[in-house]
Image: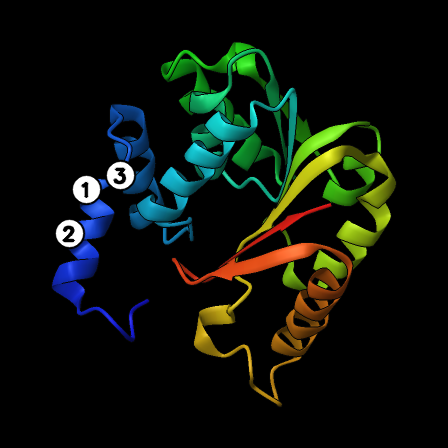
Amino acid sequence: MSAIFGKEILDYIYNLFSLEDEVLKEMERFGKENDFPIIDRYSGSFLNLITKIKKPELVVELGSGFGYSAYYFAKALENGKVVLIDYQERNIERARYFFEKGGLTDKAEFRVGDAVEIAKEYKDIDILFLDLEKLRYLEAVKTLEENLSEDAIIIADNVLWHGNILSETDRKAERLREFNSYMSERYRSIIIPVGDGLLLSVK
């Protein structure tokens, strides 16, 4: 998309469809001040819209950080819950703080530990969101395929790897290409060129 439209047009699109929320703004400030990578607003709005359309009972997020992307899921949930999983307790505690501030703790479950191992505890996952260590994307989806609901959606962030997805010397780029190929062959998939690339797949 950025190759077609200039920055002004992209800013217009991003600002027009961004979800306005004071807690999200505080989370963005926290991410910037602490040099903590998060998805961009437009990607967040996309996650929010997919959730509204899908109406999932269970969203499981691998690699939640301090809960920024999970917050977009939670804002759109009607009766379901989002499970936030991160290996660092301080990240999950920060996420809990933001969810409490936004009044969304009743829509969330907070877990600390190995994301793939914890996610195996859940069945009938309606939306699986991957944002953990990039080398583990393929392992994660292969491990959790039997845990997905019949019409599950899989979403993965960073699948264009900062524009370096075709690099022959970057190990993470190579593993992400393997993941992207697997998803294109096994699922109905599309890569949406927003943020660092979002892959959307359905069973």
Residue 69, image x, y percentages: 46, 38
Please determine whether, in this image, residue 19 is positioned above or below residue 173: above
Please determine whether, in this image, residue 166 is positioned above or below residue 109: below
Q: Quadrant of residue 64?
A: top right
Q: Is residue 136 left or right of residue 129?
A: right
What is the number of the mark on residue 12?
Answer: 2
Q: Quadrant of residue 9?
A: bottom left
Residue 123, image x, y percentages: 82, 27
Contact (CB < 8 A) between labels 2 and 1? yes
- Of marks 3 and 2, which one's residue comes earlier in the chain? 2
Contact (CB < 8 A) between labels 3 and 1? yes
Report which residue position mark 1 lands on. 16
Residue 98, image x, y percentages: 41, 24
Real-space Cα separation, disc 2 to disc 1, in angstroms = 6 Å
Q: Is residue 131 left or right of residue 138?
A: left
Type of the residue with mark 3: Ser
Residue 180: tell me if it is visible.
Answer: yes
**Image quarter hosting the N terminus:** bottom left
Residue at the image position 49 percent from the left and 36 percent from the top: 50
